[in-house]
Every structure is written in C-alpha cells, then in structure tokens.
Image: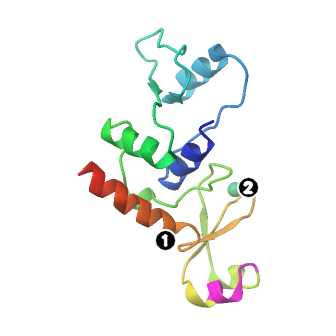
Amino acid sequence: MLGKLAKGLRMLGYDTVYYRGEGTYPLIKMAREEGRVILTRNNKLIPKKPEDRIHRIMEDKPSLQLKGLIQKKVISLNEKTLFSRCLLCNILLNEITREEAEGKVPDFIFFQQKKFFRCPQCLKIYWQGSHQENMKRKLDELRTITK
Ligand SMILES: [Zn+2]
C-alpha cells in the first residue's frame, strides 16, 4: 500500500525495504535487527520495546506522506543523497562513464546528459533527468510547505 512512498524515500536516498512478508512479528524483528523505522498504515502495529520506532502513515497521497514525515522529522531532505539509490532495488548506484551509457539510453538523453549512474543489481541506468525534473519540482513544493 505504501509502494509509492517507498520509491519516494529511495529517491531521497533512504535505505527503504518494502516489507511483503506476513505477520507483524517478523517485521518488528527485522526492524530491530537492522535499526529501521517502520512506516505503516496498520493501526494495530504498536511499539513493544523502547527501541521500536513505528510511525503511522495517515495521509493518502504519497507527496503528503513525504511531507508529513519531514514535518515530524522522521526524515529530512539532503541534496547529497538525492537520486543515489535504485528505486527498484534499494541499492546505491554507481557512476558510469558516458561511453558505458552510450547505446543503452535514448540518443537525445545521451547528448543531453553529462552524468550517468547504473544499478549494480538490475543494471538500470539512471541519469540526472530520469526522474529528477518531476521529483525536484515535488521537492521544491515540499520545501516551501515545510519551511
Ligand atoms: Zn536496481
């Protein structure tokens, strides 16, 4: 249910696991072991230990969910980590040379862009404009709301 939020968080550079398993205990156990904050719509999920960080998402729109998380200081916007992670695999991207990207991205993109990045797992190639323009605009909106 929070798939779009997960992608948004990865876009901001957050290490985000989308939990597809069953039951709440394995989820809480994993969060404890990996030091993660749980974001959920499930109101039955409540912290049982002081280290449990469970944050309930009330908003429906992904942009408002992100805004809410920023306002509650669960996350923050950091220019340096923006667009550093694969949106599908949650893995840090590697910068590749223009030569490596040639032929693997549309020609007009190749000539337009200077920097290219690749996911080491799914090999998807990203460039600064691939989701940036849209996202930058959204982020600017978020900033104006959160200031
Ligand atoms: Zn990937």
The disc, 1 or 2, on the residue closer to the chain's N-terminal end is 2
Q: Nearer the viewer, residue 42 or 106?
A: 42
Residues rendered magenta in the picture: 104-110
Residue 147 in sight in this render: yes
How many numbered marks appear?
A: 2
Q: Residue most toward the front?
A: 60
Disc 2 beta carbon < 8 A from ligand 1?
yes
Image x and y of residue 77, in percent: 36, 52
Name the residue tied to disc 2.
Answer: 121
User: Can you say whether 23 is above or below 147 in the image?
Assistant: above
The structure residue drawn at horizontal position 46% and vertical position 31%, both measured from the top left corner, is 58
Asked if the residue under mark 2 is in contact with the one under mark 1, i.e. CB atoms within 8 Å, the reply is no
Tell me the quadrant of ligand 1: bottom right
Residue placed at 63% from the left, 36% from the top?
Answer: 1
Q: Which residue is mark 1?
A: 133
Residue 75 visible in the shown view:
no
> In the shown orientation, is residue 73 left or right of residue 23?
left
Where 58 sits versus 130, above or below?
A: above
Q: Nearer the viewer, mark 1 or mark 2?
A: 1
Q: Is residue 85 magenta?
A: no
- The amino acid pointed to by label 2 is Gln
The secondary element bearing badge 2 is classed as loop
Mark 2 is surrounded, within 10 Å at the Cα level, by few (under 14), some (14 to 19) or many (20 or more) other residues, namely few
What residue lies at 52% left-to-right and 17% top-to-bottom?
A: 43
Q: Amino acid at mark 1?
A: Glu
Q: Is residue 33 above or below residue 50?
A: below
